[in-house]
Image: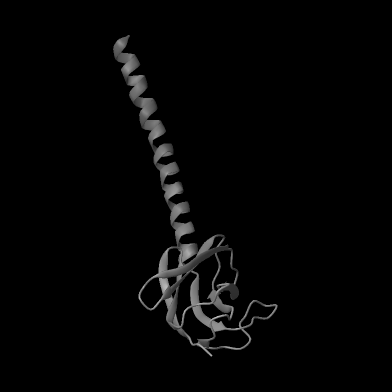
Amino acid sequence: MFQSSRRLLATLLLLAMPLVVGACAKKTDQMQSQSSQTSQVTVTSVDLGKTIGADKRVTDQADTFAPNDVIYATVLTDGSSPNVVLRTTWMFQDGQVVAQSERVIAPNGQTATEFHIEKPDGLPPGKYKVVVSLDGNPVQTKEFEVKSS
């Protein structure tokens, strides 16, 4: 009796094995598919300026600003994904982080995403850069300067 129970258990395990392996393979395929969807989105450009339009695009590109200007960055992406994280890190010339912000987007084709920085008491004169990251990976850097009037 014990021998037949072991055979039955072994037979059931052998029959169940393809189902378990198949389920694991399906989950892996889904994860790879989601990963490749994210990697299909690219940052095509970063534009800086003092104003933006209703389409979230910079209307007057600039790389020099006054201390009290609002500095807009339009991040243009291309591709499709249900969930992509864009982050901007605004840095002073010495590497000090002045500000960071992020947006979760679900692009489908060409998409414009707006970021901006401003300080009520004004940004100190000097050279700056904004680093744009896509899902945690830096992909573009744009340099600019703040000059006193």
The percent coordinates of residue 64 (x first, y second) are 51, 88
Nearest the viewer among 74 and 124 is: 124
**For the N terminus, which image quadrant?**
top left
Quadrant into which the C terminus falls:
bottom right
37 is higher (above) or lower (below) than 8: below
Q: Residue furthest left?
A: 3
Q: Nearer the viewer, residue 57 or 101?
A: 101
Up-down relation of residue 138 to residue 124 (above or below): above
- Residue 43 in the image: state x and y as whole percent: 49, 75
Residue 33 lies left or right of residue 96; in this view the side is: right
Q: Is residue 137 above or below residue 10?
A: below
Residue 73 percent across, percent down from the top left: 55, 77
Horizontal relation, residue 16 to residue 7: left or right = right
User: Residue placed farthest to the bottom in the image?
Assistant: 149
Here the colouring is: one colour
Residue situated furthest right in the rendering? 54
| Residue at 63%, 86% in the rendered image | 59
On screen, residue 1 versus residue 100, left or right, reads: left
Q: Out of 29 and 130, give the one closest to the viewer.
A: 130
Q: Position of residue 131 (x, y in %)?
A: 44, 74
Q: Residue at x 45, y 42 (%)?
A: 23
Residue at position x 51%, y 80% in the image:
46
Residue at the spot 46% in from the left edge and 67% down from the top edge: 134
